[in-house]
């Protein structure tokens, strides 16, 4: 099933006309026409600077999809002219095809998708300075307050761009210029920052175990063959998947081609970068939102020039302008972080497969618990499964035991069952570390008045406010609204009547401290003050054995290897199950399997305890029995029976607005004008799973079709015939939604 790029753009040659289409990174449906001034040559893919209203912006010369001569007659004289070509390599046809494909598939204007590719290299960098200023020994003849601020700002003796120096000092550029003229500052060329070192495929090649060698052989052959194929690298945590796909990376490096490695939580995968460096001698280029915009601008160019060989990044790395992409890897391919839920709703794993197809590059999906979609594709032979059946070091997969909360639960107001507490004590005594897992940030998920029963909710969302005791406030996890914890009930004004209900990780820490007073505890969640840097430091502290009990949210489930971790306790294994979300079983299975897999990675057989009210639930049974196939068999059969993905396709339309009646009325009108075909069933409108967010009321329509049906085309036709919505109403289209 190959797609020829030419089906999207029949004509990739530069148009003879002096008018070209330029796609701008905006939410508009089509490209705009611009005149090409005398003396400038542009071709599709070129990044150009064009005027738009009062400002200039970057756009991409877009292939004209119409046949030559079909172009409508345009009054050339009235068109604005392209200002200049931007000095970066043109976007390659495969990236333009990807952008167009994603726009079509997600029913989004192509400019919105282009924005994902150009966001990191915006006009801000057009006037990039290549020279910087630095303090000399000389002092100014005349010392004004402004001049003194510049001197203070530069007192570290480091070289800075002129604009940056002025900004740091809070003065105008002329003050800096004056100091340069006087010789107080000297100007120097800023040396270009190297984008990344060149990885050496032979730096430290490991001896592979037989199953690894077999899988690596297949992957190396796929890289050399330069053909598109999807491989599922399937093996438990610690089975050596990373080490195995590194062999494919080595092959791509030898072939002089580039590799993209997508990771779900890149800001935290310091350990991964180090591991890459010990295998290849240098770190890969890192690409995610925490990388500075200056560095991203530099990387953008270096990736386009082919100078950067390997990029490890978050989902946005998918849109980098690789010069010659020869391998795409999606690590932890089942992870929900790959789905972007705002702007362009796309699933990075699926789009990585599309990108591989357009580049004729093999794609590797790695997971211990593949998504149901991927598992079904592997079972049907569409994806090639490469299995790594055992843990590399021969370490045992942790033993899982359920703790039945109906029979051996903790006392009221406590969340750690006596047996779990006892096992934690034993683990610590024998020098091991314990991890308590609870996917709830903060102190308590709900605050309730014991006098009148009032529950404190967010004023602009349909969610309860969560108490955060470290920060002494109540917070909304939807919109970020925060307020101090009130001293009386906001409803009945009874003083001191508010009580926290249920546990969050902060509250759990209190309980651990009471149970094990000498234990060193640490909460790890995204709330940690100090951001990513602090988190990295804390993760290091855990690795060094400076912490006895880690209390963490799903953040700790992802990719961290704590060598001393001997046991895991899942405080509430049932969270997520039984809310009518058809993906709940899959998510719970994946998450708990992953968390439990954190135990005993080194040489100790770890143990994991699942506190549950439903030990007979198929998810718990499959986890406890260690029978992954049993879980998939059952889940696949159920989805097929109920005609749910991947055996059917869904598209969600979220209609939102400040006025619930208007939003609902528009959702009804949309439903009423859905084109009739026996292939599609439109369900709703109903209140969306989050009925209100940031003051907007949300209603959801679901369109369901058979698997092979082109649901995107259907939705596009539907939207084209839809009545105009009021200006406050917004319609978001979410193809392949995560909940349905
Ligand atoms: P996974 O990606 O499946 O979780 P890893 O590739 O991280 O597994 O391997 C688990 C551990 O085993 C790592 O510490 C890794 O360095 C080690 N390992 C895996 N394969 C080899 C090998 N062939 N030689 C030496 N060490 C290996
Ligand atoms: Zn809110």
Image (cartoon, grey):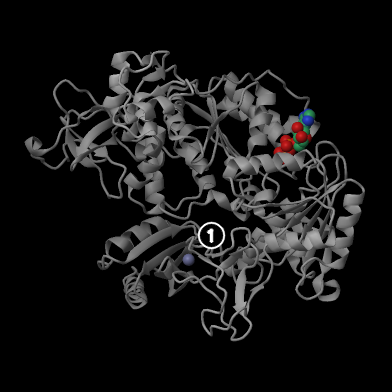
Q: How many marks?
A: 1
Q: Quadrant of residue 309?
A: top right
Q: Is residue 645 above or below residue 90?
A: below
Q: Is residue 254 above or below residue 230?
A: above
Residue 682 in the image: state x and y as whole percent. 42, 70
Residue 378 in the image: state x and y as whole percent. 64, 47
- Out of 92 and 615, give the one closest to the viewer: 615
Q: Is residue 386 visible?
A: no
Q: Residue at (50%, 20%) from the top-left corner?
A: 194
Taking 546 as reference, is 651 left or right?
A: left
- Out of 164 and 181, give the one closest to the viewer: 181
Q: Quadrant of residue 123?
A: top left
Q: Residue at (26%, 68%) from the top-left corner?
A: 726
Element type where label 1 sits in the image? loop
Q: Is residue 374 visible?
A: yes
| Residue annotated with mark 1 | 738
Ligand 1: which quarter? top right
Q: Quadrant of residue 641?
A: bottom right
Q: Residue at (54%, 37%) from the top-left corner?
A: 313
Q: Is residue 249 above or below residue 533?
A: above
Residue 536 in the image: state x and y as whole percent. 65, 40
Residue 716 in the image: state x and y as whole percent. 34, 58
- Out of 89 and 430, give the one closest to the viewer: 430
- Out of 320 and 438, give the one closest to the viewer: 438
Badge 1 local density, few (<14 within 10 Å), some, or many (20+)?
some
């Amino acid at each position: 099933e190959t797609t020829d790029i030419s089906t999207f753009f029949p004509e990739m040659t530069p148009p003879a006309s002096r008018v070209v289409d330029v796609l701008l990174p905006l939410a508009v449906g089509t490209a705009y026409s611009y005149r090409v001034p005398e003396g400038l040559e542009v071709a599709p893919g070129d990044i150009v600077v064009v005027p738009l209203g009062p400002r200039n912006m970057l756009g991409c010369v877009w292939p004209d999809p119409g046949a030559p001569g079909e172009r409508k007659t345009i009054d050339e004289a009235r068109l604005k002219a392209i200002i200049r070509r931007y000095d970066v390599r043109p976007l390659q046809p495969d990236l333009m095809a990807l952008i167009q494909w994603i726009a079509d598939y997600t029913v989004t204007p192509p400019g919105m998708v282009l924005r994902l590719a150009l966001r990191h290299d915006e006009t801000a960098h057009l006037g990039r300075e290549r020279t910087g200023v630095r303090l000399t020994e000389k002092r100014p003849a005349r010392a004004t307050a402004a001049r003194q601020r510049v001197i203070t700002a530069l007192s570290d003796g480091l070289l800075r761009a002129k604009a940056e120096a002025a900004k740091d000092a809070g003065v105008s550029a002329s003050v800096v210029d004056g100091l340069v003229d006087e010789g107080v500052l000297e100007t120097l060329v800023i040396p270009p920052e190297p984008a990344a070192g060149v990885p050496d495929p032979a730096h430290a090649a490991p001896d592979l175990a037989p199953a690894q060698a077999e899988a690596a052989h297949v992957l190396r052959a796929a890289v050399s063959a330069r053909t598109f194929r999807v491989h599922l690298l399937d093996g438990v945590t610690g089975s050596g998947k990373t080490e195995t796909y590194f062999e494919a990376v080595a092959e791509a490096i030898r072939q002089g081609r580039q590799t993209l490695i997508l990771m779900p939580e890149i800001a935290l995968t310091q350990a991964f970068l180090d591991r890459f460096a010990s295998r290849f001698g240098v770190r890969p280029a890192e690409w995610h939102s925490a990388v500075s915009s200056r560095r991203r601008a530099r990387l953008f160019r270096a990736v386009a020039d082919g100078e950067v060989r390997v990029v490890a990044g978050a989902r946005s790395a998918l849109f980098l302008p690789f010069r010659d992409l020869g391998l795409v890897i999606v690590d932890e391919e089942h992870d929900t972080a790959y789905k972007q839920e705002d702007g362009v709703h796309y699933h990075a794993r699926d789009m990585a497969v599309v990108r591989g197809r357009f580049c004729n590059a093999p794609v590797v999906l790695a997971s211990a618990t593949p998504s149901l979609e991927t598992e079904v594709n592997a079972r049907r032979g569409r994806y090639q499964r490469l299995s790594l059946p055992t843990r590399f070091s021969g370490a045992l997969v942790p033993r899982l035991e359920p703790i039945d909360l109906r029979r051996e639960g903790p006392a009221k107001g406590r969340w750690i069952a006596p047996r779990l507490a006892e096992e934690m004590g034993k683990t610590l005594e024998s020098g091991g570390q314990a991890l308590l897992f609870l996917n709830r940030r903060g102190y308590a998920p709900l605050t309730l008045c014991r006098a009148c029963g009032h529950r404190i909710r967010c004023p602009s969302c349909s969610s309860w406010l969560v108490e955060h005791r470290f920060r002494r406030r109540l917070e909304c996890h939807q919109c970020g609204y925060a307020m101090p914890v009130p001293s009386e009930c906001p409803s009945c004004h009874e003083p001191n009547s508010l009580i926290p209900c249920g546990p969050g990780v902060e509250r759990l820490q209190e309980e651990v401290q009471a149970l094990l007073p000498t234990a060193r505890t640490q909460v790890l969640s995204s709330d940690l003050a100090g951001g990513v840097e602090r988190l990295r430091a804390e993760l290091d502290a855990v690795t060094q054995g400076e912490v006895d009990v880690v209390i963490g949210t799903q953040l700790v489930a992802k990719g961290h290897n704590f060598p001393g971790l001997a046991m895991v306790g899942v405080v509430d294994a049932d969270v997520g199950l039984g809310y009518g979300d058809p993906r709940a079983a899959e998510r719970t299975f994946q998450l708990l399997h992953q968390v439990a897999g954190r135990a005993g990675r080194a040489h100790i057989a770890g143990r994991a305890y699942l506190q549950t009210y439903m030990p007979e639930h198929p998810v718990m049974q499959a986890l406890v029995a260690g029978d992954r196939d049993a879980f998939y068999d059952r889940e696949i059969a159920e989805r097929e029976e109920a005609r749910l993905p991947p055996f059917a396709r869904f598209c969600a339309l979220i209609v939102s607005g400040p006025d619930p009646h208007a939003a609902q009325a528009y959702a009804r009108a949309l439903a009423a004008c859905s084109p009739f075909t026996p292939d599609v069933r439109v369900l709703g409108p109903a209140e969306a799973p989050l009925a209100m967010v940031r003051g907007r009321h949300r209603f959801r329509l679901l369109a369901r079709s058979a698997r092979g049906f082109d649901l995107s085309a259907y939705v596009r036709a539907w939207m084209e015939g839809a009545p105009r919505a009021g200006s406050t109403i917004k319609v978001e289209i979410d193809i392949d939604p995560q909940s349905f």
